[in-house]
Amino acid sequence: MPGSPELSLKGVTLQRGSFLLRADGVFMPGVHLLTGRIGSGKTTCGKVLAGITRPDRGEISWSGTERVMLLQNAGYHVTRATVRDEAASWNTDPDTVIRLAGLSGKEELDILFLSRGELKRLELASLLSRGSDLVVLDEPFNALDDDARRWVTRLIAEAQNRIVIIISHDITSLPPVHELWETEEGVLKKIGRIPGDMRRWDKSPLLIRYLWQKGENPAGLSRSDLEEAVCRIHGSG
């Protein structure tokens, strides 16, 4: 599609102490899941993809406009005193963002009085309302209850012609995922398309391996795909 954003990494390396990140790959519009063990380099890679951290070597080609990232701790992003001012600081319509985040009536509340979940909803609503070409979300489901997790998946699923990269070890709340990536000992690897290449996921979570052992091949990694696969097992048992 002409004008679609594209992010390409070639020979990218980043050294931090004894840790070395190595990344090659091309990211096109769609939802990408980036998984990996703790300490494997997921967040570091996310910062490079979002343009927050510059690599030591390699080429990064970016054809879109804005790249943004929401870090795991939403409190790192807070720059204003009230809910309204914080929403406005993202250069979005604050009333729309506050309503989208389910915080109507709390516009003038001190931002520090929000719960972790409320703050996460506010920052997610602000970021996803900007229309950025690339959005990196580091553990976006942390601190959210079940309803809020469903709300986030809807927002992500509604994004059109964007590159959305979800960094997460939690696969129980995902929107439809198009491509799967993994970091292993600092190396970024592309597993492939979902669902066609899922069997190539050697380090898949226990739930996925359980479904395969029961003869089920989920249609994807979204929450509804996994729930349907589990229901088929129980329905046939």
Image: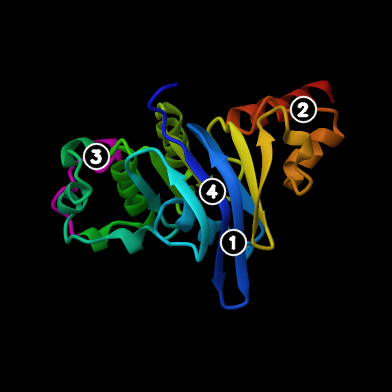
Q: Residue flagged by tag 4: what amino acid is it?
A: Leu
In the picture shown, does residue 165 fall above or below 31? below
Give the Cα distance between marks 4 and 3: 33 Å
Residue at the bottom extreme, as displayed: 17
Residue 116 is situated, as x and y percent measured from the top left of the image, at: 37, 57
Q: Please identify, in this view, whether the residue under mark 2 or under mark 4 is nearer the observer.
A: 4
Which badge, 4 or 3, comes first in the chain's sequence?
Answer: 4
Q: Quadrant of residue 210?
A: top right
Identify residue for label 3. Answer: 97
Q: Residue flagged by tag 2: what amino acid is it?
A: Asn
Identify residue for label 4. Answer: 9
Q: Magenta: predominant secondary structure element?
A: loop
Q: Please identify, in this view, whether the residue under mark 3 or under mark 1 is nearer the observer.
A: 1
In the picture shown, does residue 148 fall above or below 123? above
Q: Please identify, in this view, whether the residue under mark 1 or under mark 2 is nearer the observer.
A: 1
Residue 187 on the magenta segment:
no
Of 58 and 151, which appears nearest the observer? Answer: 58
Identify the magenta region.
Answer: 99-110
- Residue 169 seen in the current view: no
Question: Seen in the image, is 143 located left or right of residue 105?
Answer: right
Q: Answer few, some or many: residues within 10 Å of disc 3's Cα (few below 14, many 20 plus, some between 14 and 19).
A: many
